[in-house]
Image: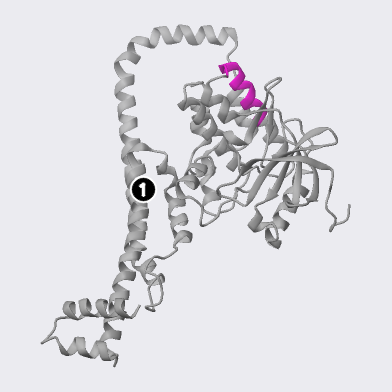
Amino acid sequence: MTENNFSTDYTNLRLLYTSRYGNSRIYTANANGKKVIVKALKEEYAHDAACIALLRQEYETTSMLDNKYIRKALDFVKIEGLGDCIVFEYVDGKSLAEHVRVGTLSEKQVKNILTEVCDGLYYLHRNGLVHCNLNPENIMVTASDLHVKLIDIGVPETKQDADRELLIKEMEFVAPEIIKGEDYDSRADVYSIGKIMEFIGQRNISKQFHSAATHCTQFSKEQRYDSISEVRLAITKGHPVVKTIIIAVVAIVLVGLALLYVPKIKANVEKERAERRALEFEREVRKIESEQEQLCEKYALTSLSEPIEVDWSEDSLRIVGGLVQYLALDEYKAQAMQAVRSQGASIIEHRQADFDQLLLNEFKSTNDSTAVAMRTALVEPTETELLNEARKWFEHHN
């Protein structure tokens, strides 16, 4: 098929999903009697050269992958009404997120699924790729035999005008170094699978991966497992029978001492951890507050024709990136979001002050007959009185 021809091989196109925060839309279709998935660009991006290039790059990368735990990319075609598209194999099943939400999986099945996710990621990492977008929605579980298919491999789509709460929710599974725009490696996927284990544990499906999840989700990538193979080992490791018996005997002998000392030790550890986290959070908030003057100057209003409201999403997303680890913590979420909102409020307040000063200067200096009459009517006016008259004058002329 040539580059300018439209394929007629894909019929019965049905919209399945439209990305709320990215540039893609997903369809099901029939091709030669088989069901497939078609990924196209949203209508407003269908002719954007940069978006098309990224879509083609995604296809060229994923089409080279051949692993039973990764969804296959079958073709790159033009479809009339959609434009350039990637065609993927259809996965008959549900996402891991759906299974966890309704509680359909046993602990053994969860363990098998996480193991297969690790095997799929190992294949990617061995081939020099990082998933970057691993979350429960992007792990499909087949209906027939509960096997894994990883989908949507690549850097997460995020737009500056995206819904803020949705972005924060998506960031829950994305490694901090990716959010901050820093260099990343396979340990970014280690972080994501750790967050997925936490997601499973929070819904009481399985608590057995708590230790592995904690090791995976360290903020610093140097403190995480070095490879996905280590994560797999942490998930699958078991104790031989003899070792289990020895551990049980030792546990019985030490249980008395544990009852006396463990609660106190645990309380001290939790207290130290909470104090350290509080200091780190306070330091991050102070850092944000220190940027206030610089941000207000950056978004200063220079003309009466400019709007008071201003799009500062580029800086707000950067600030959210620095606070992302606290947004998942109930005791800090409200404060963290308030720190972001306060910056926005400061920018708006500063722009309003700029507007008032520009308006006052214009009112004082204009020779407009209405303005002259209004100024003449005032006897030894204060700046506040002049500003109030200036606002009336401005509304009259606009």
Q: Nearer the viewer, residue 166 or 212?
A: 166
Residue 135, percent from left and from top: 58, 37
Q: Is 392 above or below relative to 175?
A: below
Q: Is 164 above or below relative to 239?
A: below
Label 1 element class:
helix
Residue 246 horizontal side relative to residue 74, left or right: left
On the question of residue 154 being in view, the answer is no
Q: Nearer the viewer, residue 157 or 9?
A: 9
Q: Nearer the viewer, residue 251 or 163?
A: 163
Residue 229, percent from left and from top: 65, 31
Residue 372 horizontal side relative to residue 255, left or right: left
Identify the image quadrant of the C terminus.
bottom left
Residue 145, percent from left and from top: 70, 19
Residue 171, percent from left and from top: 51, 44
| Residue receiving disc 1 | 336
Main SS of residues in magenta: helix
Circle 1 Cα neighbour tier, 10 Å, few/some/many (<14 / 14–19 / ≥20) = many
Where residue 332 sits, quadrant-wise, is top left
Looking at the rendering, the stretch of residues picked out in magenta corresponds to 105-117
Where residue 371 sits, quadrant-wise, is bottom left
